[in-house]
């Protein structure tokens, strides 16, 4: 995967800008986390402090390898939904302030997406 330089939001300065070129890697992380959480669905007897189950979640991560194809399909579908329903014709969305914008033309060549699966 080629790293894409991240620039801050032009409105609020936050680095929480979701760019069209980075959608698939971001949604793949979300899909893997979803898989880990589904694998860890265990009833707890008593309420526990926040993050006390983190070790259990970390132990589930290797098991996601069996579900990787499903995670990739889920990520591909989610990135398509985000492109269609959130971004539309725009290229980036700030998750902090909600500003949507077209990519700034700074003379750089667009990043090549190497981990994006082919469009169905």
Image: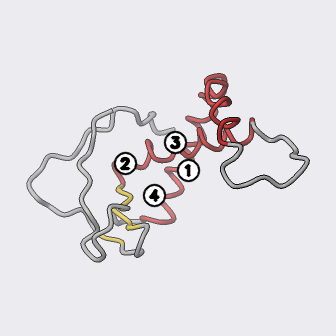
Q: Which mark is residue 22?
A: 2
Residue 66, image x, y percentages: 66, 22
Q: Which mark is residue 29?
A: 3
Q: Earlier in the sequence, mark 4 or mark 1?
A: 1
Residue 35, image x, y percentages: 67, 38
Which residue is at a point 42% across and 70% down the rendered structure image?
A: 96
Indicate the quadrant where residue 56 lies.
Answer: top right
Which quadrant: the N terminus?
top left
| Marks 2 and 4 close (CB-CB < 8 Å) | no
Please rate how many residues cluster around mark 2, counting C-alpha atoms within 10 Å: few if below 14, some from 14 to 19, many from 20.
many
For disc 4, the marked residue is: 83
Helix, strand or loop under label 3: helix
Single out the mark in the foreground, 1 or 3. Answer: 3
Measured in 3D between alpha carbons, the distance from the residue under mark 3 to the one under mark 2, in whole angstroms, is 11 Å
Residue 51, image x, y percentages: 66, 49
| Marks 3 and 2 close (CB-CB < 8 Å) | no
For disc 1, the marked residue is: 78
Q: Which mark is residue 28?
A: none
Which of 85/7 is in front?
7
Helix, strand or loop under label 1: helix
Q: Earlier in the sequence, mark 4 or mark 3?
A: 3
């Amino acid at each position: 995967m080629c790293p894409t330089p991240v620039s801050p939001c032009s409105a609020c300065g936050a680095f929480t800008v979701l760019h069209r070129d980075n959608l698939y890697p971001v949604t793949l992380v979300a899909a893997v986390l979803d898989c880990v959480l589904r694998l860890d669905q265990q009833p707890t007897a008593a309420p526990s402090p926040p993050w006390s189950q983190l070790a259990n979640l970390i132990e589930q991560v290797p098991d996601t390898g069996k579900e990787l194809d499903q995670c990739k399909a889920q990520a591909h579908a989610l990135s398509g939904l985000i492109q269609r329903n959130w971004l539309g014709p725009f290229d980036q969305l700030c998750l902090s302030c909600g500003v949507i914008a077209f990519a700034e033309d700074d003379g750089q060549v667009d990043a090549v997406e190497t981990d994006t699966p082919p469009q169905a």
